[in-house]
Amino acid sequence: MSGAVEWIALGAASVTAVLVGVHRNRPARVGPWLLLAGALTSLAVGDVCYALGETTSADLSYAIMFPLLALCLLQLTRGGAVLVDRARLIDLLACACSVLLVVWVFVLGGTGDIGAISAADVLGDLLLIAVAARLTVTAWRNWSALLLLAGALGLLAADLTYPLSPGPLAETGYTILYVTWGAAALHPSMARLTAPYPAHPTPWRSRWAALLAVSVATPPVVLLVEAVTTGVTDGVVIAAASMITVVLTFTRLADSLSQHSAALTRERGLREASAALVAAADLPAVNEAVRAAVHQLLPDGVRGITFATDDRQLALAAPPVVDDRRFAPGATEPRPDSIVPGHRERSWWLPHPATADGEATLVCPLWLEPLAVARPSGGALVLTGARELLGPTRDTLEVLAGQAALALDRISLVDAVGRRDSDLYLRAVIRNTADAMLVIDSDQHIRYASPAVRRLVGVAELAPLATLHDLVHPDDREQVRQALRAEGDGVVFCALLRPDHTQVFVEATYRDLREDRLVQGFVVTMRDVTDGHEPGERLPRLDHVGDLPARVNRRSAQHKFRY
C-alpha cells in the first residue's frame, strides 16, 4: 500500500507541474504538453495498479501511455515547431525500429533472463530517446529538451533493470522520469519547443525514400521468416514494430502533402499579388493588392493589417541591428559559427505581452528586393495575429513586402517622370511669356521658375535648391508660409528681395494642386504691383487692399493723393 501511495504522490506532483508550467509559460501550442500530462497520468495509474497487484489494469494503462507519448512527440515535431522539417527524423526512426526488431527477434529474443524484458517497451523507449535527443540537438541549450531526454533515459533504464532485478533501486528510473518531465514543463524554455519557425523543407532524396520503404517492409519479412523456420513466437513484438513503422510512414506522407499544399498556396498567392502590384497605378491600388494577398496567404491568422508607405505613419520600435549569426531554433544565444557584419533584419517581432492565444505582431519593412536596401521613405507591412500562423509564413510575407516596395518605387518614378515632362512642357510653352510663374513643392522648394521670375528678382539663374522662402522679404515670410499651409487656392501680397537689397511688391496668386498626380505642388503666378509700371498695373485689385502689407498700403495712399 505504501508503494501505491508513493506512486500516487509522484504522479500527481508531475502532472500538476506540467499543468502549472503550461499556465505560467503559455507556449504557442498547449496540445503536446497536455498529451504529456495525460501520458504521465496513465503511467502513474499503471504504477499504482501494479503496486496493488492489478497487473491486467497496469498493462492496460502502460499500453495507453505509449500512444499518448507518440501523439505528444508528433505534436512537438510538427512543422513550424522547433523541428522545422521532421522528414529525416521520421525516416531514421522507422529504420531504427526495423533494426531493433531484427536484433530482438534473431539475436536477443528468448535468450535466458533477457527474455523477461518487454521488447515493445524497450522499442518504444528507444524511439522516445531518439526524438528527445533530436530535440536536444536542435534546440540549442534548451533545458526543457534536456530534461525530457533525461526522463526518457530513466524510463529505458527502469524497463531494462526492473524485469531482471525488481526492487526500489530498479524503480529509480521511473522516479527520475516523473521529476524531470515535470521540471521540463516548469522551465521557461519549454515555450520555445513549440514556437513557430519558417519552414525550410529539405529536398527530396531517393535514398531516404528507399530507406523508408525497406523499414516498412522489414516487419512482414521477419514474420515470414519466423513462420517458415521456427514458428511465430514474437508476434506481439512484430505487430508493435509493424504498427510503429506504418504510423511513421503515414505521418511522413501527410507531412509531404501538407508541405506541398502550403507551397502551392504561397506560390499562387505571391503570383496573383505580383500581377496585381504590377497593374497598380496608385497607392490605394497597392494597398488593396497587399491586403488581398495577406488574406489569401493567411485566411484565419491575421487580426490586424497596417500597410504604411512612410515611417512617419508608424509609431513602432526601431528595427534591431544584429550580427547575422546562425541561431538554433529556440536558442537564446547564437551558435559559434561564422559572423557577417551587422545589418538590419528583414522582419522582426514587436515586444508583445504574453496572451493565451499566442497573439504576436510581425513587422516586415518595405525592402527593395533586387537592391536589398530599404526605401528612402521607409514604410512597413505590420501584421497582428496568431504567432503559430505568422511564423511559418514569415519568409513569404517578407517577399510580399519587397514586391510592394518595388510597386511603390515604380509608381513614384512614373510620377516623377510625369512631373518632369510636365515641367519641361510648361517651360517650352511659356519660355518667352511675360508672366512670372513658379511651380513649388509642398515644402516650398522651387521646381520650375519662368524667365520672368528671374528678371523680376534680378538674377540670371536661381540656386538649384532655392525655395520661395529665399525670395520673399523676411517680414513677409511668415505670412506666405501660413497662406501656403492652408487648403485651397488664394492670393497673397508680399515683397521679393533682390540681391541689391531693393524690393519688388507682387500679387501672388497660387493654386493648390498637391493632389494632382502630375503636379503635386503649388502653381504660383506673380504680378508686379510696384510703382512705376503701367497705370493699369500700379494698383492691386481693390478687394484685396486690406490684405496688403502696411508699407504697400502707404505707397498706394501716396499714389492716390499725389495729384
Image (spheres, rainbow, N blue to C red):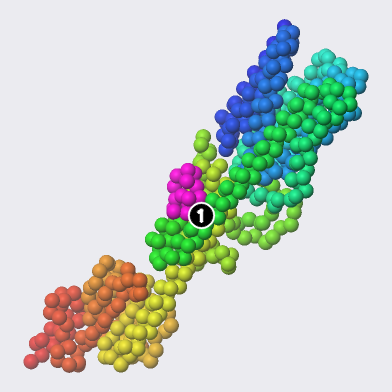
Q: Which residues are magenta?
A: 291-306
Within 10 Å of disc 1 (Cα), the crowding (few <14, some 14-19, many 20+) is many
Please tell me which residue lies in front, 203 or 171. 203
Q: Is residue 198 magenta?
A: no
Residue extending furthest right?
112
Q: Eyeballing the image, is 159 above or below 328?
A: above
Residue extending furthest top?
1
Q: Eyeballing the image, is 508 above or below 257?
A: below
Residue under label 1, please give it. 269
Looking at the picture, how far across and down is residue 197, in whole percent?
A: 61, 46
Q: Which residue lies at the image location 25% right of the left edge and 69% below the top edge?
A: 488
Looking at the picture, how far across and down is residue 421, in whole percent?
A: 39, 81
Residue 134 appears in the picture as rendered: yes
Q: Secondary structure at mark 1?
A: helix
Please tell me which residue lies in front, 193 or 397. 397
Query: The C terminus is located in which quarter?
Result: bottom left
Q: Which residue lies at the image location 77% right of the left edge and 23% below the top edge?
A: 236
Q: Which residue lies at the image location 57% right of the left edge and 38% below the top edge?
A: 28
Query: The N terminus is located in which quarter?
Result: top right
Occupied quadrant, residue 556: bottom left
In the rendered picture of this protein, how many numbered marks are placed on residues? Answer: 1
Looking at the picture, how far across and down is residue 141, in whole percent?
A: 72, 41
Drawn side of residue 279 relative to residue 193, left or right: left
The amino acid sitting under disc 1 is Gly
